[in-house]
Image (cartoon, helix red, strand yellow):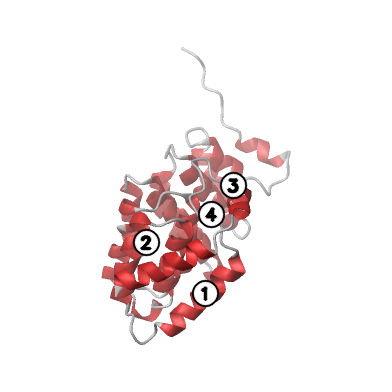
Amino acid sequence: MIKEKLKEIRDFCNKNANAEIVTKYSRYFKNGYDGYGIDSKVFEKQRDLWIKAWKNEMTLDKYLDLGNELMRTGKLEEKSFAIAFVKSERENYTTATFERIGNWFNIGITNWATTDVLCMSVLSSFLIDKVITFEKLKEWNDSDSEWQRRAVPVTFVELLKEGLEPKTALPIIEPLMLDNSEYVQKGIGTLLRGLWKKWPNEIENFLFKWKDQCGRLIVQYTTEKMDKEYRKKFRALKKEKV
């Protein structure tokens, strides 16, 4: 069954590939855009058709098995299909589901786009539905994959809509404040900027604590919406040469 689904998905992707779209989006990916270039409306229509058509034959476990193959060898759109299929089974998520999805970072998640779609569409639901604890997500801070580490703050970005508070988020992301990955830093900065809109005092105090040590992109992204003069207070002090 999995082989048949893989063939059907890849036949569709090859049939709807568009080189112009690949060229258009390549500039957003430093390491190259490994995708078919499928129009988003075409992608979404087929996604919904498959989820409806396969409802009685596919289970969450089968979608995870299919997802393993798509993540291991697939292009960007194929990985997006894997995420969408698992999203459709939200009501059946367990801690074991979270563990299996976490393994995707070891076998095939290699860019910010796939990471962020997974965070917004799937990973945030594990916290919203209380399938896992915040401490469980915190374990990803120690991952060798920069994309899995990025997933920690980016998953929290989606939870801003649910009223995420600094007292919950900051202890989880603080171990990442010295991370060297630009993508992790951007994820943290985006989260802090979102929290700052509602809790400016708490976030400014936190940033002031870290500004002389953390990556510049964290400060840049966090202060992006601040007044130009006001944000200067968060400039890192230049270290004196010995």
Position of 124 with respect to 61 (left or right) is right
**Residue appearing at x 43%, y 61% in the figure:** 79
**Residue 125 placement (x, y as % from top left):** 43, 71
Identify residue for label 4: 191
Residue 145 numbered tag: none
Residue 46 numbered tag: 1
Identify residue for label 2: 70
Q: CA distance from mark 1 to mark 4?
A: 32 Å
Q: CA distance from mark 2 to mark 4?
A: 29 Å
Position of 158 with respect to 232 (left or right) is left
Name the residue type under label 1: Gln
Identify residue for label 3: 222
Cβ atoms at labels 3 and 1 below 8 Å apart:
no
**Residue 207 placement (x, y as % from top left):** 54, 43
Secondary structure of residue under mark 1? helix
Q: CA distance from mark 4 to mark 3?
A: 8 Å
